[in-house]
Amino acid sequence: MKTSTVLILFIVMMQVITTANAVVFDGGLGDVVFWFNSALFMGALAVYVYRMDKDKAAGK
């Protein structure tokens, strides 16, 4: 899967969690949603950096 597709999936997951919190739980899960969104962001960053480093190594 392309890096851009993986990053878009991470963004979609973050939006689904935020929307579910707003619609279903009336914003009551603020800290939990923040924690999950932060974890997803760090995961997306790790995927991006890993693939960027892998591409640089292949180019040498």
Image (cartoon, rainbow, N blue to C red):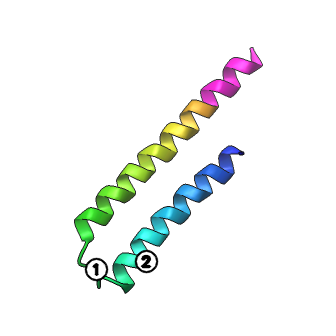
State left or right for residue 49 relative to residue 38.
Answer: right
Question: Please, what is the three-letter code of the amino acid marked with disc 1?
Answer: Gly
Q: Position of residue 49 (x, y in %)?
A: 55, 34
Say which mark, if any, is on residue 57: none
Residue name at image x 43 percent, y 77 percent: 19
Extreme residue toward the right, this view: 59
Q: Is disc 2 placed on a helix, strand or loop?
A: helix
Residue name at image x 36 percent, y 81 percent: 22
Q: What's drawn in magenta, residue-wise?
A: 52-60
Picture layout, residue 20 above or below residue 13: below
State left or right for residue 6 relative to residue 36.
Answer: right
Q: Is disc 1 placed on a helix, strand or loop?
A: loop
Q: Position of residue 11 (x, y in %)?
A: 53, 60
Q: Position of residue 23 (x, y in %)?
A: 38, 85
Q: Quadrant of residue 29?
A: bottom left
Residue name at image x 35 percent, y 57 percent: 36
Q: Position of residue 9 (x, y in %)?
A: 59, 58
Query: Pointer 2: what residue?
Result: 19
**Crowd rating for badge 1 (residues with CA inside 10 Å; few <14, some 14–19, many 20+):** some
**Crowd rating for badge 2 (residues with CA inside 10 Å; few <14, some 14–19, many 20+):** some
Picture layout, residue 14 above or below residue 4: below
Query: Pointer 1: what residue?
Result: 27
* Label 2 vs 1, first from the N-terminus: 2
Give the CA separation, mark 2 to mark 1: 9 Å
